[in-house]
Amino acid sequence: MSPFEDPNVGLLPSGFIDLLQHEAEAEARGIETVMEVFGAHGYERVRPPLCEFEASLLLGSGEALTEQTFRLMDPDSRRMMALRPDMTTQIARIAATRLADRPRPLRLSYTGTCVVLGTPGREGERQITQAGIELIGVDSALADAEVVLIAAEALSRLEIAHVSFDLSCPALAQAVIDAAGLPSAGRAQLAHAVDRKDAAAVAALGGHMAPVLTALLDAAGPAATALRALGTIDLPSEARRHAERLTAVAHAIADAAPDLRVTVDPVEFRGWQYHTGVCMTVFARGVREELGRGGRYLAHASEPACGLTLRPEALLRAARPIALRKRVYVPHGLSAARAQALRAEGFATVAGFAPVADPASEARRLDCLYVASHNDLTRL
C-alpha cells in the first residue's frame, strides 16, 4: 500500500477477528458459565497481565513456548517484553511469588486472551481465548482426575453432548524411546515414527524396544480395553511407573463418573511442550477441533502442578446456542419503573429518546422483538 493511500480500517492482521454483538455476548456468557463451575469447586480466579518481561514469561517450563511468543520492546525500560501465548506458566509464576505462602494444594482459575504464533494446526488463530484451572502443590492420581471431572462438569453445563477425554502420557513413550539407547539422530527418527504412529517405521527403527513400542501403538482405544493391553506390555521401569499412574488416573475418573467417555493413547506426545505426566485432550462427537487440553507439569521450583485449559471459541461452536435476551423497545415517556420491571423479567430494554409516530417500525429498526406499553408487551 502506498504511504499516501487511505488505509482500509476494516482490515485486520491475519489470525485476528472482531466478535460482533451476538457472538461476543455468547462467548462472555459461556465463559462465565465455565468460571462459575470452577469457582464452585474452590478454584479462585486470578488475572495475570497480557504482557510480561520476556525473561520471566519464558522462564522454566515457559521456555518451551519460545517459538510461539510475540515479542516487543518496552519503551520505558528498554527491556524485551512478550505477549503471553499461554496462561499456564503465568499462573505458575503467581503461585510461586504472590501466593508462595498460601497453603497447598492451591486451586486457581483464569480466563483471558493470548497471542500465539505458529500453533500447529491452528496457524490462522493468532488471538485465542483461554479459560482454565490449575491445581498446584499436589502430585496424585486423584488430583489429575479432579481437573478432568471439573472440566466435564463445565462442558455439561454448556450442554455439550458426547464429550470424551483422551488420556496420554508423553513421558511414557519418551521413556521407552530413551531405553532404545539410540544416537541422537536415530532417536529423532524413532520419535518421529512414533509421533506419526507408523508401525512399520517403528519396527525398523526401534531396535530392541521395537516390540514394546509397537505394542504401545496397538494399546490405544477406549480406556478399559487400552489399559488391559497396557498392563500386559513388558515396559522399562521408568515407563512402567508412568503407565501405572495413567492407569490410576483413568480408574479414578471411572469411579467418580462411570458414564464419562475416556480413551487412552499411551504414545501420544505431539504438542505437549512442558508436560511431565498424565495429559488429557477434550473432544466432542461431531466436532473436529479439540475443546481443550491440559496435564501434569512442574511449576516454579519444581512444584508439582496439574491443569486443564478450555478453548471458549471451540466450546461455543460445539455447545447448544445460548439464548440471548429478548429485546424490548421502550417508547419515550414510558416510566423507568416499567423498564426496570422488564429487565428484572430477563428482557433487554432499548429506550427511545424521542416520541415516534410508529413505535412498531422503530422497534423493528432497532432489532427488537417486542414493544412495551404501560401494562403489556406487543410481540412484533
Image: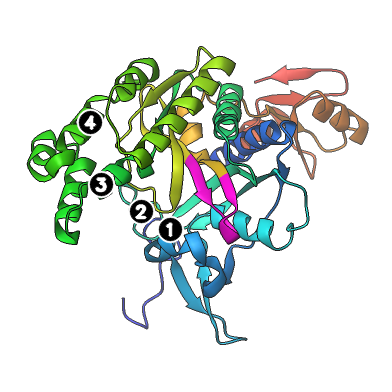
Structural crowding at the residue carrying mark 1, measured as other residues with C-alpha within 10 Å and reported as few (<14), some (14–19) or many (≥20): many
Region in magenta: 294-305
Residue drawn at point x = 63 percent, y = 62 percent? 49
Image vertical order of residue 7 relative to residue 380, above or below = below
- Side (left or right) of 281 relative to 348: left
Q: CA distance from mark 2 to mark 1?
A: 7 Å
Is there a contact, CB below 8 Å, between mark 2 and mark 3? no
Q: Which residue is mark 3?
A: 179
Q: Nearer the viewer, residue 107 or 353?
A: 107
Depth check, mark 4 against mark 1: the one in front is: 4
Identify residue for label 1. 116
Tell me the quarter of the image containing the N terminus.
bottom left
Q: Earlier in the sequence, mark 1 or mark 3?
A: 1
Residue tagged by mark 4?
217
User: CA separation, marks 4 and 1?
Assistant: 31 Å
Work out which residue is located at the far front of the displayed protein and give it: 237
Which of the two discs, 4 and 1, labels the residue nearer the N terminus?
Answer: 1
